[in-house]
Amino acid sequence: MNTVSLHAVRKNTIFWSYIILAFIRIWIATQTPLVAHMSSLFDDQAFINYTRNILSGNWLGDYSHLTLRKSPGYSLFLTLSFYTGIPYQTLLTVFLVIAVLFFLHAVKPLIPNDIVRVILFAGLLYSPNSFTYRFLQATYRMGIIVPSAMMVFAAYIAIFLYRHQSPKQLAIYGIFGGIGNAIFWFTMESSIWIAPFIITCSLVIFIIWCIQKYQGTISLSTLTKKGCILAIAPMFTVIAGLGLSCMNYMHYGVFLVSDYTQGSFARLASTIVHIKAKDSDKYGSSVWVTRNAIDLAFKNSPTLRTVEPDIRKAWDGWAGSTTKELQGDFCWWALRTGYQDAGYFKDAEKNSAILRES
């Protein structure tokens, strides 16, 4: 058998290895039982309720203390599954396959061996983490976090490693990164942690291109076009954010995506979490707001004192007793519940004005 034939056999073997590994992975996903954890009112059930309302044409539903707490990215993914007719686990796994293939293409200059990349493909696709309850077995947003983040990382790695390619070729990587970043950013409220990676990569790559322009290896026009490519991922996120904010403004009268990170409630929460009480450092990062800290908030805010009984009751309810401290962001759920029990969170616009005074 000549060299050309051996090369063709090797190429076909590699190609079919990808196809078979992907097909088996998708088949396993379709055979995995799926659970909708509806007992989790403030988490899993919230996303299911968002999806139901979107499908019924009622956007995220009637306004309450739960309506704008979560970013709707995951519910839009569930909606896409419904409208395309593709089963959720199949769509999720296809998304993972695409993300892994894109990542492998991005690192190809670092891993030129085809067989090694196939092994890496199998390792990433069949990672034990991708079979866990929160990833595959339940309708929960963690399922799309990994592939969307992988697409963002892969996009900037690809732009760096293929930085000598034409702007048109690099734009493809930018678009993939933009899609991944928009999905990631509006699926988790804490997605800002990916921003330093994007900013740092963009600065490093742009500086390299500026050096090339100084050396005369690229033109000013090319530098400008390539520089714009670095902004594709952030621009996708900005455009998606404006679209979601417009939808919320049309339905609730407030221009924001989630009141967990934006708006009056977010500012109130930020103010409270920065209150320094005598025991603020006692529990480390496990307790964000101690009872002593919320006592100081009541003492110094006349508006907050008007709902003090309801908030204290909600605080005790979420803690399970009057002596326990609330762990993590449970303090914000207690705060929301207290305001809800006091008769607020009925009108987003009015509620925003009241919370500004707290």
Image (cartoon, rainbow, N blue to C red):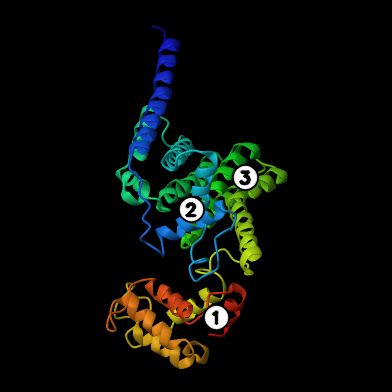
Instruction: Determine whether the residue tagged by mark 1 lies in a helix, strand or loop.
Output: helix
Q: Which mark is residue 212?
A: 3
Task: Give the class, few, some or many, for how many residues have Cα within 10 Å of label 1's Cα (few <14, many ≥20).
Answer: some
Instruction: Between residue 215 and residue 174, name the one nearer to us.
Output: 174
The percent position of residue 357, horizontal first and vertical second, equals 57, 85
Task: Give the class, few, some or many, for how many residues have Cα within 10 Å of label 3's Cα (few <14, many ≥20).
Answer: some
Position of residue 165 relative to residue 75, above or below, is: above
| Marks 3, 2: nearer the viewer | 2
Q: What amino acid is labelled 2 in the image?
A: Tyr
Q: Quadrant of residue 323?
A: bottom left
Direction top: furthest residue:
1
Q: CA distance from mark 3 to mark 2?
A: 41 Å
| Marks 3, 1: nearer the viewer | 1
Q: Which mark is residue 211?
A: none
Instruction: Determine whether the residue tagged by mark 3 lies in a helix, strand or loop.
Output: helix
Position of residue 182 relative to residue 278, above or below, is: above
The percent position of residue 321, horizontal first and vertical second, equals 28, 80
Instruction: Between residue 226 and residue 85, name the one nearer to us.
Output: 85
Q: Quadrant of residue 28?
A: top left
Q: Quadrant of residue 262?
A: bottom right
- Residue at 44 percent across and 49 percent down: it is 144
- Which is nearer the N-term, disc 3 or disc 2? 2
Q: Work out whether residue 144 can be spotted.
A: yes
Q: What amino acid is labelled 1 in the image?
A: Leu
Q: What amino acid is labelled 3 in the image?
A: Gln
- Residue at 71 percent across and 46 percent down: it is 220
Task: Give the class, few, some or many, for how many residues have Cα within 10 Å of label 2's Cα (few <14, many ≥20).
Answer: many
Residue picked out by circle 1:
355
- Which is nearer the N-term, disc 3 or disc 1? 3
Direction right: furthest residue:
221
